[in-house]
Image: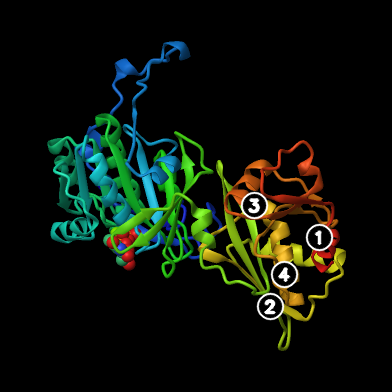
Amino acid sequence: MRSKSSYICSECGYKSPKWLGKCPGCGNWNTLNETIETPAPASASARKSTPVKSSFNRPAQLGSVKYNNDTRFSTGMRELDRVLGGGVVNGELILVGGDPGIGKSTLLLQICENTGKTKKILYVSGEESSAQIKLRAERLGVQSENLYLLSETDVETILEAITDTKPDIVIIDSIQTMHIEAIASASGSVPQVRETTNAFMRIAKSMGISMFIVGHVTKDGALAGPRVLEHMVDCVLYFEGDRQLSFRILRAVKNRFGSTNEIGVFEMRDKGLAEVANPSKTLLEGRPENISGSAIVCAMEGTRGILAEIQALVTPTGFGNPRRMSSGIDLNRVLLLIAVLEKRARMNLSNSDVYINVAGGLRIDETAVDLGICAAIAASQADIALPADMIFIGEVGLGGELRSVSQIEKRLTEAANLGFKTAIAPKQSLRGAKVPDGIKVFGVRTISETMKLFRG
Ligand code: TYD
Ligand code: MG
């Protein structure tokens, strides 16, 4: 067996026999690293346990395919279940990504308490000792008798432990610490990550084990060895949020067993992660009153509306080019809205710095919050505080027109539930819409019409 060297992109896993400055796969520079590849021996258990037997491998008529209805089970955390599409599917491979310290290990340890009532769990950690995990489990109130701990990084040993223990759920924390002896490169490198995930996937599928794999993200926010991993697993969850703030948002970016537009909201407390069943209320708590440049919007995340506070700060530019900064909203969208405000609402922002922030560390990529962003900018420039019980809904077009948004009734209901009294919304969205009690809606057609509304 001869080992050969090749160059592998650390971003996308592209493989080349010679060194290249730019990766043809993903276009990044200086990402190809030399890797000595030793072909894994054919007897390695990773190869041995191919799940597909030839007798199963015949085309089947759709109608004759059988499946078990109760293949899903709950994690005991409704927020997590929702993101997964209604619970974990037996044999599902779930990748949980996120910055270090965001709470991945905490979340996975916490679900052990509930799932441990009916299922056997093996928690494999390559980062902490069993004693450390026990300590944390005690703090989180996890004391399931069905939870087994293993502090190990060698994949062969882990696979043996899995075959031995026959768990229903396996947690691998984290994939970057795992390694296969037969592969020469270091833990966390693309070949290691790919092969270890492969080995875990085989055993999960063949034994019907649901497996959670923790993956760390790189500085740019992508999973290390990203695309190679995302292809293989059934579900990719990202755990995000500001480490300084206590909010954590769980988002699915890929889900073979559900939709990807649901989010789960958690809060990090001293006893672990707590579910936030009413994120709007929590996000708006402690909102300063009578401060200029703050507007409330409603963004839809999956099936629910989430109210958020958009803050804008417009200050005179000291010298040079005006600065525009945005956190939580795409900067390009903010630049576009500033241009619309200048051209269509006759605002002059050419000598002003504009800063936009979504309170609570939330990230919104929905155009229905455009009007709120515009209102916040206008209010900050005019130095007026918008009414605290007013909400802004609407997409802003380049002509300064307000465009209709989807699910207007749901947004208005969420606002009414939280005690909002007035809403500004696109006129055409309101046609035929049922306005919930307790909220008065002003339908407007253009951005300049909106500006007049709170001037007069
Ligand atoms: P952790 O789950 O270890 O993060 P990850 O596995 O994603 O790297 O989370 C650790 C952080 O969470 C740490 O900074 C401390 C904080 N934390 C709490 O605030 N309360 C708790 O009950 C626990 C267990 C952790
Ligand atoms: Mg961890």
Find the distance from the CA under tag 2 to the CA under tag 4: 14 Å
The residue where tag 3 is placed is 366
User: Which label number is shown at residue 291?
Assistant: none
Q: Amino acid at mark 1?
A: Thr
Q: Mark 2 against mark 4, which lies toward the viewer?
A: 4
Q: In the rendering, at what x and y percent does residue 88 appear?
A: 36, 36
Depth check: give the residue in front, 73 or 256. 73
Identify the residue at the far front of this view.
438
Say whether disc 4 or disc 1 marks the residue closer to the N-terminus: 4
Give the Cα distance between marks 1 and 3: 20 Å
Q: Which residue is mark 1?
A: 450
The location of residue 364, given as percent across then percent down, is 59, 56
Quarter holding the N terminus is top left
Residue shown at the point (45%, 37%) measured from the top left: 85
Report the image quarter containing ligand 2.
bottom left
Q: Identity of the amino acid at label 2?
A: Arg
Left or right: 210 in relation to 23: left
Estimate the spatial distance between the alpha carbons at disc 4 and disc 1, rounded to whole Å.
13 Å
Whether residues under marks 4 and 1 lie with C-beta atoms below 8 angstroms apart, the answer is no
The residue lying at 70 percent from left, 42 percent from top is 435
The residue beneath circle 4 is 377
Task: Give the secondary structure at mark 3.
Answer: loop
Instruction: Determine which of the numbered discs, if any, sits on residue 323 in the image.
Output: 2
Give whichever of discs 2 and 1 has the lower sequence position.
2
